[in-house]
Structure formats: C-alpha cells, structure tokens
Amino acid sequence: DVKVTQSSRYLVKRTGEKVFLECVQDMDHENMFWYRQDPGLGLRLIYFSYDVKMKEKGDIPEGYSVSREKKERFSLILESASTNQTSMYLCASSNPSGLTDTQYFGPGTRLTVL
Amino acid sequence: SQKIEQNSEALNIQEGKTATLTCNYTNYSPAYLQWYRQDPGRGPVFLLLIRENEKEKRKERLKVTFDTTLKQSLFHITASQPADSATYLCALATGGGNKLTFGTGTQLKVEL
C-alpha cells in the first residue's frame, strides 16, 4: 500500500512565523503535490514537483515555497505565515504512467495562524 | 474561464437507494476523469477513473459515466449504506496529465 505521511496533523503558529510542512511518501513516486483545502473552494494546487530539485507553481503559489531535495520528501514552506493561510494542507504523490495519474493523499495538516 | 462544478448542497438519501452525484465542467477537454472519496479530517482516497473514450465504468456498487459532449460525469452508488456517507470529489486531468483539477465536492449522507 502507498503511504503518504505528513509531519503534523494539527499546527498552530503566529503571524510572521516561518512554517515548514513536511511530506514523505514510501512508494518511489516521481510526482508530489501540495494542496490547500478550504470550505467552498475545494482543493487548490499550490506547488508540484516532477522530480528531485524540480518544482512548478500551481494555481495559488503566492506566499509559499517548496523544497524537494530527496525523491521521497516534499516540503512546503510558509516564509512569513499570515492569518489567510489558515487552512487544511494536503500532500499527494503519484507515478506518471502516461494513462492515469491517481494521486495518493496524506492525512492532511490543519494549520491555524493566529 | 475553466470550471468544474459539483452540487454544493448535501445529498441526503435513504439506505438501499441509489445515490447519483453530478460533475459538470466547462472549457476543459480532459483525457480522463477521476472520482475520490473524502472522510472528515482525512485526505481524499481514489475510487474510479474513466477515460474520454469510455462511456461507463463499474466497480462493485459504484458506477461512473462520462459524456464528453455534455461535459458531464455521473457517479452512482447503488444499494447505498450509511458507511457510504462522505464527500465525493471529481477531478479532471488538466495541464499535461500529471496535474488534476478538483471540484469542490458533494457531501452524501445515507440515512437509516
């Protein structure tokens, strides 16, 4: 079974703090994704990565950065957290097959910025 | 603009009935469409995939249809059970196949 783990289930930070969210997958997947999920807005893609050290902006990259130094690990960084970044953050991974791209999700991190 | 629409209102049905959820999209030509299930406080879990050249796909009590002319997918759960209560998300392959764009989801409640 594919397993995607996220470093924290719940996190509370203060405005202006630097926040790291970690994601690890154990299936040697090439693709990894970071989403945020908000009521009424659904899942929105922040950043994704096709390979180590590669990253591409998703639909809402502003205020975020990412790092992928190893294939199994994809980190989301909030350089200076703001209250509008309070959300559920979901990491996912997939293996590009050319025909399908089923994504496997982690359990999510609920981040509250005070 | 590109849009994926799912009914934002919760769907309440009685146990044993068939639940039908709708996913409509505009301005996309997806190679395939996926359906995911999400339980409260958890990440989505993949259920089914249907390709653009397939009309229908089945898996146990689940059935998905895909009409590329209407730009619509229907997701059916037959003989529904309270354990089927969850939010169901549709997702379209966009931007080169590795990216998915998700709808906002429809919450299903199956009552005894």
Image (cartoon, rainbow, N blue to C red):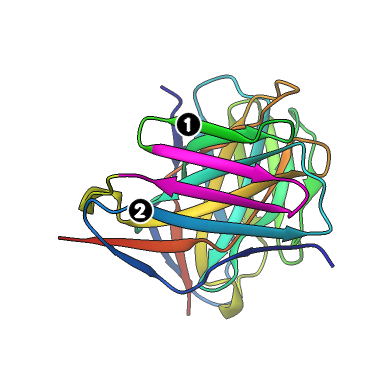
A68 lies above or below B112:
above
Q: What secondary structure is found at the residue carrying circle 2?
A: loop
| Tag 1: amino acid | Arg
Magenta-tinted stretch: B62-78
Circle 1: is it few (<14), some (14-19), or many (20+) Cα within 10 Å?
some
Circle 2: is it few (<14), some (14-19), or many (20+) Cα within 10 Å?
some
Residue plotted at (76% across, 22% down): A98
Q: What residue sits right under mark 1 in the picture?
A: B58
Residues at circles 2 and 1 in contact by the CB criterion of under 8 Å = no
Q: Where is residue A68 in the image (x, y as percent from the top left)?
A: 69, 36
Q: What secondary structure is found at the residue carrying circle 1?
A: strand
Residue plotted at (58% across, 19% down): A28
Seen in the image, is A112 located left or right of residue A82?
left
Q: Position of residue A41 (x, y in %)?
A: 60, 70
Q: Looking at the image, tell me whether mark 2 or mark 1 is earlier in sequence order.
A: 2
Front position in the image: B33 or A31? B33
Could you tell me how far apart the alpha carbons at marks 2 and 1 are, in whole angstroms?
22 Å
Residue plotted at (79% across, 41% down): A55
Q: Say which quadrant the N terminus of chain A sits in.
A: top left
Q: Position of residue B78 (x, y in %)?
A: 34, 44
A62 lies above or below A113:
above
Q: Which quadrant holds residue A79?
A: bottom right
| Tag 2: amino acid | Asp
Q: Mark 1 — on which chain does it sit?
A: B
> Is residue B43 visible to us here?
no
Q: What residue sits right under mark 2 in the picture?
A: B39
Magenta span includes B72 = yes
B3 lies above or below A102:
below
Front position in the image: A25 or B82? B82
